[in-house]
Amino acid sequence: MKFKNYMTQKMKSLVLFIGLGLSSAVAFGQMNGSYTIDAAAAASATNFQSWTTFATAWNAAAISGPVTVTVKSSINIGTAFVTLNANAGSSATNTLTIDGQNTTMTYTSTYAALRLNGVDYMSLKNMTIENNNTTPGGIWITNQSDYNTISGLNIYLSNNTSATTGAYYIAMSTSVSSPTSTASVATGTTGQPGSFNSIENCSMYTATGNVGPYYGVTMTGNSSNYTTVGQNNTTNGNQIVNNDISRANATSGASSSLFGIYSYYSYSSSRSAQINGNAIHDLPFPGATTTTSNLSSYSMIYNYYAYGNTTNRTQVLGNNIYNIFSTTSTTYGLNIYYPQYIDIQNNIIDNAQSSGTSATMYPYYVYYPTQATFNKNTAKNVISNYYLYNFYIYYPSYIDIIGNTADKCRQNYTSGYFYNFYIYYPTGVKCNANIATNNYCGYYMYTFYIYYGSVGTYAWNEFQDNIITGNSSVSYNYSAYIYYYNGTNNFKLNRNY
């Protein structure tokens, strides 16, 4: 499919290039070596004066070796978005590297400024993409764009004044106007948008007074044909690592609902899908309070049907979510749904507050995990005016819950419940060395609530070396409520003081 699309694009573009009178090397569809994008220099066989002329050349050519493009000019592309298509010569050896050299691409129209339509083995780095439209996007990845790396970019939405679900920083989807559109078949433009891509060390932000996008980064796979066996219709092995998503430069405004990182039907067949080391913070803006915030609902990391395997496990590691203030609706820090073979470790949620008197807070929400580790995660300074579940783990099968900490969290509702560790219907669980300290509840507190556990194929369940200290409640305060544990259990060395 990619080759067919490429040949059609090449023949259409070849006529244009002959008319432009460029070198025969480009005109006859060959690219190899070093090029520049420099509006201040004359057009030549190796210099393009605009992003548009470079994209036209790329889309007409088959590369015969590695191509490096150095961008030397900041360029306003107006309403002419840039599309890079599949190239028949692309491979792990014949790569495309675009070094932005700290320049800026400014785009003034709707949705994504840069659109990767089946392009493979591309590295894009060191530049700013600014979109000043009211319905903006940064980068759109589609049509099986694989093995690409986006690194060290600033993506700035400078005029996002209207709340819309079509706004995003980076989207892997089947529609440029819908960052969560899913595939209906395995290949082609309605197939999976991309696999084995990396988005790393990027900063994504908006201007003050703007609402900001509904989605930060999205990765959407195929739900209708999806199975637990890796295939072309899954977003496979994508990695979102060490990015910063915030409104740290804003002083007001925000979308009322948002997703920070959104992953839908991912797989880790030969490389682990990763959401690691990202910072999502200062929402809706620095210095906000539950009184000044208009943010009502969110999932900062949403990972739906993530399938790892024994060799390549899905990873959600070392993310830092902080300074989040919301109002009236249910909120999720990490919202991870039906994962298999997943590691959720070393994440921190700090200073998340909600004022809603009917708004349940789930700093960590893990639903039906199988073969999972949930270790060394932290919830601290979380404040709820309704129900609060710091670590909500529902129907887990074979899970380690080890070394997690709930610290200085408050549930202020005088008729509500506060669960630090809510573990419902576990099969094969090791709940060890967790700490709950200095938490407060306005009504009923359950530090450990473990309901109807069974051992499965384990020799026994473990509940040991947990520490409960300095917690208080207006009414009932249960340190450990363990109901109907089946099989052999190993309960020891827990401390409550």
Image: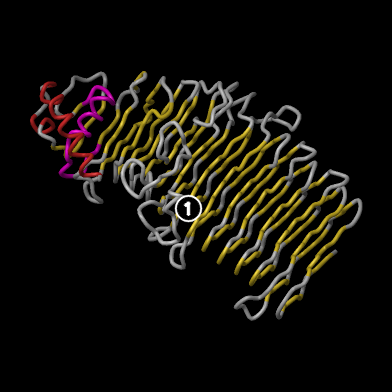
Q: Residue furthest left?
A: 24
For disc 1, the neighbor class at 10 Å (few under 14, some 14 to 19, many from 20) is: many
Give the side of residue 85 with respect to residue 132, left or right. left
407 to 161, vertically: above or below? below
State whether residue 313 appears in this view. yes
Q: Find numbered disc 1 in the image and state the secondary structure of the residue it sits on.
A: strand
Residue at point 43% right, 49% down? Answer: 222
State whether residue 145 appears in this view. no
Colour scheme used in the picture?
A: secondary structure
Q: Residue furthest right?
A: 475
**Is 64 within the magenta?**
yes
109 to 244, vertically: above or below? above
Please provide percent x and percent y for residue 309: 46, 64
Q: Nearer the viewer, residue 381 or 223?
A: 223
Q: Nearer the viewer, residue 69 or 56?
A: 56
Q: Nearer the viewer, residue 58 or 266?
A: 266
Residue at point 69% right, 51% down? Answer: 379
Q: Which residues are magenta?
A: 48-68
462 to 120, vertically: above or below? below
214 to 317, vertically: above or below? above
Q: Quadrant of residue 48?
A: top left
Residue at point 35% right, 23% down? Answer: 74
Residue at point 58% right, 58% down? Answer: 345
Please state which amino acid type lies under the numbered disc 1: Gln
Give the side of residue 381 with respect to residue 249, left or right. right
Please provide percent x and percent y for residue 79: 36, 19
Q: Quadrant of the C terminus?
A: bottom right
Q: Which residue is mark 1?
A: 274
